């Protein structure tokens, strides 16, 4: 395999960058974000690009500014909003309630061209109580001359001293179509513009095809097959759920994929209990 990686550390900018050896940027991981509190600040990867340099992620889109490209978040942890935007309640719908939480970088444990790993503290916005302590790693692999992969793994431990409820507005309040949570990928707007081409779209295991078939289904893997504007290059983004099937939250018109760790009901975490995450994303130039 002739594809190699280089890691550029930019501590003053609160970021690290992964580059193709002798080539261009593949990923910029911002570990100290400066996004507004209303968007539940958290580390994010943007841009994420293919080996040819095709940009795949979108950051702070005008329809949902709290969609921060590629990031991991939870809609609600015992009533604290770590997703961003307004918080939903049955009695009065979506409103900003000053209940946003933050994910704060604490310390690095590894920064190499094959893997970065750090500790994060999930804090409430008002009294900065620490609810979760997370150990997160991002591993980078050259798959071929046309593809590379990112494995996103994490363990989130309840350090609050009390039982926490992890949920979203579907599991907590029964709000249909609101299962936003987990690993979130917001793609560029051109990715799934089908323009009458049946080879462009959303595909998943179980012979599923299209948003209606994939959204809300338990998925071991899913692929976005698209075509970029200007270059007209074809790309594939593949999402693999390493811990087994997860229900997918998928939108095509504003390309979004999320994989909530719970679906129909809230998930409880006892003091000291942990939630684990294991996703692999593969980015291919066709």
Image (cartoon, rainbow, N blue to C red):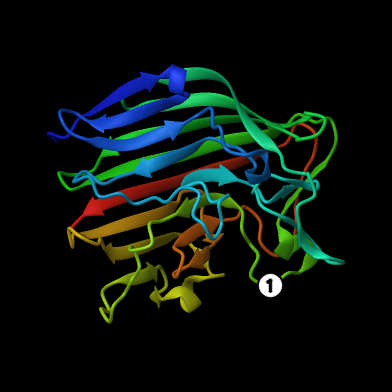
Residue 252 found in image quarter: bottom left
Residue 36 found in image quarter: top right
Residue plotted at (46% across, 65% down): 254
Please indicate whether residue 39 sits to the left or right of residue 270 in the image. left
Q: Tell me residue 170's x, y (percent).
A: 71, 65
Where is the C terminus found, in terms of image quarters? bottom left
Looking at the image, is 202 positioned above or below residue 35?
below
Outermost residue, front direction?
62
Q: Which residue is mark 1?
A: 176
Q: Say whether residue 112 is visible.
A: no
Outermost residue, bottom direction?
196
Please indicate whether residue 86 sits to the left or right of residue 192 in the image. right
Looking at the image, is 53 positioned above or below residue 62?
above
Residue plotted at (18% across, 63% down): 232
Residue plotted at (33% across, 56% down): 237
Residue plotted at (62% across, 52% down): 261
Outermost residue, left direction?
2
Residue 64 found in image quarter: bottom right
Q: Tell me residue 128's x, y (percent).
A: 77, 28
> Total of numbered circles in the picture?
1
Q: Tell me residue 123's x, y (percent).
A: 72, 32
Q: Say whether residue 224 is visible.
A: yes
Where is the N terminus found, in terms of image quarters? top left
Q: Tell me residue 219's x, y (percent).
A: 48, 63
In the image, 40 versus 3, the foreground residue is 40
Please indicate whether residue 178 sits to the left or right of residue 258 in the image. right
Task: Bin the neighbour count of mark 1 within 10 Å (Cα to Cα): few under 14, some 14-19, many 20 and up.
Answer: few
Q: Secondary structure at mark 1?
A: loop
């Amino acid at each position: 395999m002739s594809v190699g990686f280089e890691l550029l550390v930019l501590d003053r900018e609160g970021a690290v960058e992964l580059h193709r050896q002798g080539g261009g940027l593949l990923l910029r991981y911002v570990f100290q974000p400066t996004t507004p509190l209303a968007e539940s600040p958290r580390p994010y990867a943007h841009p994420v690009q293919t080996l040819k340099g095709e940009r795949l992620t979108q950051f702070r889109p005008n329809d949902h500014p709290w969609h921060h490209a590629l990031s991991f978040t939870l809609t609600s942890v015992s009533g604290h909003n770590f997703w961003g935007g307004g918080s939903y309640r049955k009695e009065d719908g979506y409103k900003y309630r000053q209940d946003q939480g933050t994910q704060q970088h604490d310390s690095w444990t590894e920064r190499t061209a094959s893997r970065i790993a750090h500790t994060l503290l999930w804090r409430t916005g008002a009294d900065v109580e620490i609810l979760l302590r997370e150990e997160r790693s991002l591993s980078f692999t050259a798959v071929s001359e046309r593809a590379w992969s990112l494995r996103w793994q994490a363990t989130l431990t309840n350090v609050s001293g009390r039982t926490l409820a992890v949920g979203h507005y579907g599991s907590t309040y029964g709000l249909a179509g609101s299962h936003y949570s987990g690993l979130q990928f917001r793609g560029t707007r051109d990715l799934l513009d089908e323009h009458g081409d049946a080879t462009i779209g959303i595909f998943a295991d179980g012979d599923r095809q299209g948003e209606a078939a994939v959204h809300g289904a338990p998925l071991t893997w899913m692929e976005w097959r698209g075509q970029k504007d200007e270059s007209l290059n074809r790309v594939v983004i593949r999402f693999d759920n390493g811990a087994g099937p997860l229900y997918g939250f998928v939108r095509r018109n504003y390309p979004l994929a999320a994989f909530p760790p719970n679906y129909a009901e809230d998930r409880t975490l006892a003091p000291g209990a942990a939630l684990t995450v294991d996703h692999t994303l593969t980015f291919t130039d066709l």
